[in-house]
Amino acid sequence: MARIVMKFGGTSMAGTERIRRVANLVRKQAAGGNQVAVVVSAMAGETDRLVNFCREANPLYDPAEYDVVVASGEQVTSGLLALTLQSLGADARSWLGWQLPVRTVEAHAKARVEAIDADALTSAMEAGQIAVIPGFQGVSEDGRITTMGRGGSDTSAVAIAAAVKADRCDIYTDVDGVYTTDPRIVAKARKLKAVTYEEMLELASVGAKVLQTRSVGLAMKEGVRVQVLSSFVGDDAIPADELPGTMIVSEEEMNILVEKGEMERQHVTGIAHDKNEAKIILTRVPDKPGAVAHIFDPLAKAAINVDMIIQNVGRDKGETDVTFTVPQADLARAQALLEDKRDDIGFNRLITDSKIAKISVVGVGMKSHAGVASTMFKALADRGINIQAITTSEIKVSVLIDEDETELAVRVLHTAYGLDADDEAA
Ligand code: ASP
Ligand code: MG
């Protein structure tokens, strides 16, 4: 017998027919003698619809009232799933964020889980009742409803799994796992049996949108074993307990899988792409101490995340060019802030470019293997793809390229690292 948290995304919950399929999957999991809690998203498109209502009602909406509106999507699906489970003869009960409660801190619309009181929940689960919990929602210190930021139901599920000490948190979605890269770009992309938390964090933060990044960080911190798997499966599908999806695990567990021969040790695990960044170039910035601080200080104060930064070698006349990237959504704001500080910073021209893409190769294998970056540079150079900026971490190399070359770059790199489906391990 195991204790399992199952989470279903918006496409799995879109309409009563799909909710019935979900109910069947839940019932099967419970019928195997497991204790089950289910965390649900709103129906696909519903949260967007509710956000639009808020904008129409008041463009400068109060986040606390926004939370009241958008949290309703999950309230509807949790009640509907409980009703459907009951109609199938199962004992099921919904638990709203304030009822558990799921205590959150920080701002409305981007609340963070602080603590979950799981006593009542675990008692119900132990008594064989299926607990259905709306994702995304919590309650603030002063008793008001909160939501956890878009995609927050993943984080709800992981937080519930940590609170009830679940053996596994299964995230059911419309894809059947995490792939070496986007299968819509590379037909030979392979589904991964397992990835480490660290790898998944990097992949999630650079545009592989399977899970909310925050949920992966929480799973890593709490040691929650997470499986990503498809809810769109037939009756003869491999049961979730046999792990048909992708497991997200610690590096130690990964090493055991490699030793057992269940995973191959690759230098690169996955390749992600992100078209949502924009590049800013400031020309002829004075090459003296404090110049760079003048540029990035106003951006930091405005909570604009700067990612890649390059400062060219100083030219004669003591000037240099500084290039960096910001999220595309913040480009206009960043531009205005920098123009405002033109005299303090002392730049000549401000050039922007949003037709760029960031391509990242990720893998814990590169910790112990040299040459991963040079393989990347050479493979791109062979196809005439120009690299505009580079950043690295212990398990990631990212390059900035022209947006039009995104698909080509991803394909070329997938082949270069031996990730194509019919290749042997590199
Ligand atoms: N319904 C919310 C959203 O679309 C939360 C979620 O589904 O994870 O962002
Ligand atoms: Mg999601």
Image (cartoon, rainbow, N blue to C red):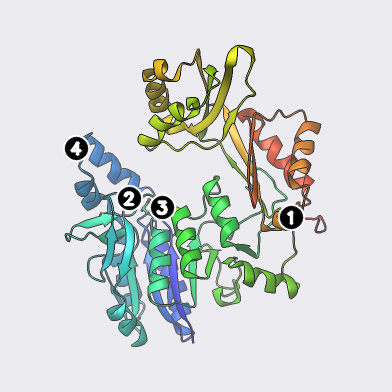
Query: Is label 4 in contact with label 3 (beta carbons under 8 Å)?
Result: no
Q: Earlier in the sequence, mark 2 or mark 3?
A: 2
Per the image, the residue denoted by label 2 is 110
Where does residue 336 sit, x and y in percent of width and height?
38, 22
Dot label at residue 151: 3
Query: Is label 2 in contact with label 1 (beta carbons under 8 Å)?
Result: no
Q: Is mark 3 within 8 Å of ligand 2?
A: yes
Q: Quadrant of residue 343 in the image?
A: top left
Residue in the picture at 28% in, 60% down = 104
Per the image, the residue denoted by label 4 is 57
Q: Earlier in the sequence, mark 1 or mark 3?
A: 3
Three-letter code, disc 4: Ala
Where does residue 44 sit, x and y in percent of width and height?
39, 51
Q: Nearer the viewer, residue 66 or 381?
A: 381
User: Vertical placement of 285 versus 62: above or below?
Assistant: above
Tell me the CA gap for discs 2 and 3.
11 Å
